Image (spheres, rainbow, N blue to C red):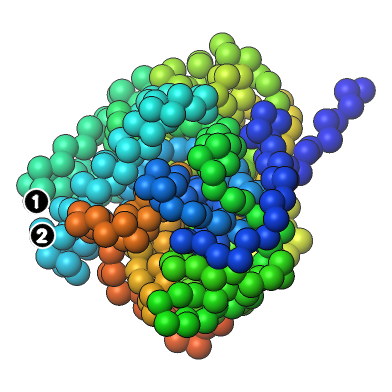
Amino acid sequence: MQKTLKIKNEPYWWSDAKPEFVAQEEWPSNADVVIVGAGYTGLSAALTLLDSGLKVIIIDKEIAGFGASSRNGGITSGKIKPSIRELKAKFGLDLSKQIVEEGDLARKDLYDFIEKEKIDCDLKINGMFVGATSKKGLENQKKEADFNFRTIGIENKIIEKKDVPNFIESNKYVGGIFDDKIGSIHPAKLVKSMIHLVLKKGGLIFDKTTFKKSERNGKKFNILTNKGLVKSNHLIIATNAYTDKNIPWLRKKLIPVISEMISTCEIGNNRVKSLMPKLTTFGEALNLFYYFRPSPDGKRILIGGRRVRYNNENPTKKLKSGLLEIFPGLNDIEISNHWYGFVTFPVDQIPKLVMHEGIIYAAGYCGSGTVWSRWFGKKAAEIILNFEQKSAFYNIPFRKIPFYNGYPWFVPVAIKYFKMQDWWINSRE
């Protein structure tokens, strides 16, 4: 009888690039900029500031890179949740166009950064297929694509049912949209390389350092941590989904959601390629969807989704069931890794870059932080450096959620609503 493999409860990515404790420096008394959070956002901000000769300190309550930056799916989407139609109704045509175009700029900037710094993080610009699971879903994609083209000139490549096998060997999808500009990376390799770059450029990183509070004293911030006090000219909060009760202004505006993934054991390059002929990344045209991709070496399949509850449901079984919905022929494979992290959603589902009482906050990437978090870190730094060209997202209102203290008690209700919407789309054939 074949022995069942024990599943590792840590990211598949960590087999190549596990976060490591950064050797401690002597605790400093002052800095030009203190950054709270040592993920893509905080590290990106630090790199931009260090290139301008500023003294930068990053603190993190965990090990640098331990959070979503080393746990995500590594898909370089650069998309946002609201449609162009919804953006136009809320912000008008000009700002909507800037917001959408900034996603392309952010994605290209990530690619340029990886190339310039010669970062080995398995970057592949292999495109993304977003599959429609019903005729109604495909019809909606086509209507949206037509509106996008007529409104701001964006072309979306529609994939008809007959062409789906060119992208994926699955009966689940009746068509979809393909974006050839989206790529994939090894997320843990990227964040580890960014940590090394910050240290190389003279930045200071303090792991296991808890931000307690900050007070404005004239033009400086007095920042209290469990390691001691530090005075700084500027303060950036880059904690996103890992924002705790010590940062209540931000915590009360973000809805955290569990995002988790599994990896198959090695099933071989030929088998993966037979299922994903172009080795692209994948999503679904649903509110509650799976995202999936081949591993960088092309020998495994990684699939992820969202989880609402913190109870005893079996997430590994749920994700494998999702995988088998897409690829029924994989019922014989075993799972090697299961892991999870957190993503956050502002109530309007638009990423946030705001200044409040002199503190710069970058957060709320809605599950697309691989591109947005690094970009918003750079843009946060540019606010300090007085760059004239600010982000189109800068100071878009960041609403507090009424009767909310950081625990998302209402999310299960919202999930039921989204499930009903998805059922309605899939039932109207």
* Location of residue 356 by image quarter: bottom left
Residue 151, disc: 1
Residue at point 28%, 64% (across, down) = 394
The three-letter code of the residue at mark 2 reads Leu
Residue 207 visible, this angle: no
In which quadrant of the rendered image does the N terminus lie?
A: top right
Secondary structure, mark 1, is: helix
Residue 93, disc: 2
Determine whether, in the image, residue 105 is placed left or right of residue 50: left
Residue 381 in the image: above or below residue 281:
below
Mark 1 crowdedness (10 Å alpha carbons): few <14, some 14-19, many ≥20: some
Q: Please provide percent x and percent y for residue 360.
A: 40, 67
Residue at point 68%, 60% (across, down) = 27
Task: Tell me if label 1 and label 2 are in contact, CB under 8 Å.
Answer: yes
Q: Given the current orientation, which residue lies at the most extreme left position?
A: 150
Distance between the alpha carbons at the discs numbered 1 and 2: 8 Å
Residue at point 54%, 48% (across, down) = 203
Determine whether, in the image, residue 143 is placed left or right of residue 411: left
Secondary structure, mark 2, is: helix
Q: Please provide percent x and percent y for residue 41.
A: 47, 52
